[in-house]
Image: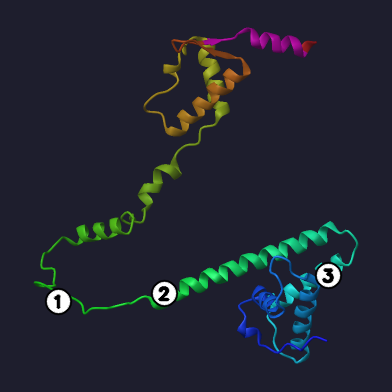
Amino acid sequence: MQDTLTFKLEDFEGPLDLLLYLVGKNKMNLYDVNIMELIDQYTAAIRTLEENRMEVSSEFIDMAAHLVQMKSALLLPRSPEAERMKEELTGRLIEYSACKEVAARLGGRARDLFTAVREPMPLVGAAEYTRRHDANLLLQAWFNLMGRSLRKRKPDQERFEPLVTAPFVSVASRVSNMLRGLLRGSIRGIGQLFHKEDSRSTHVATFLALLELIRAGRVRVQGDGALDLDRRHRRRKEGAAHE
């Protein structure tokens, strides 16, 4: 008959620490742990603490539920899942034991180190900065030091005015204008489509209109920038409509 375990969960850093304590208490081989006995002792200890109305951390309860599930799988004959869970728990205990051993060694080295603190050296010369600089330069240096640029001024209404009042140019209107110019012969090359005095919206709409005409097969661009209008395209379209 096993003895009743009496301890406090505060003495352990987590469920693995408690399991490792049970392995050592029962003098088990860490590489060949009696999983069934270990599970029974762990779950009994958690159950005893709950019956005594002592607060049990959720991580300890979660491990208890995991161990109960493992025990159920171990009771089944030839359960691959049970073997996998057993190997996983054994591996976690071995890793945790190794980490505790390394931590203990590092802690021992830290305690054996000799630490000496000397008094601060006296300052040589005046500690105050006596030079004078322009306030804007100091502000720029501060933002450069912090990896930021100078804060931009809040934009006024005049800066938004050209964007808000800019005329809207549709792509369809530029397509019609371009076809009329090609039919009349007033437009012969790409250079005649774009003008410096035109707005950005007009340039964008013109460019998209040209791409649309090229995609539809209505216009072809030669190597020198000349534009060729496919006049048979309309005839083929009308002939297909009559058919």
What secondary structure is found at the residue carrying circle 3? helix
Q: Which mark is residue 110?
A: 2
Q: Quadrant of the C terminus?
A: top right
Of the two numbered discs 2 and 1 in the rendering, the one whose residue sits closer to the viewer: 2
Q: Is residue 150 left or right of residue 30?
A: left
Q: How many numbered circles are shown?
A: 3
Residue at mark 2 to residue at mark 3: CA–CA distance? 42 Å
Q: Residue at x 41, y 29 (%)?
A: 198
Residue at mark 2 to residue at mark 1: CA–CA distance? 31 Å
Q: Is residue 144 magenta?
A: no
What residue does disc 3 label? 71
- Look at the image and give the residue range highlighted in magenta: 228-241
What secondary structure is found at the residue carrying circle 2? helix
The type of residue carrying mark 2 is: Ala
Q: Position of residue 54 (x, y in %)?
A: 71, 90
Q: Which mark is residue 207?
A: none
Q: Position of residue 17 (x, y in %)?
A: 64, 75
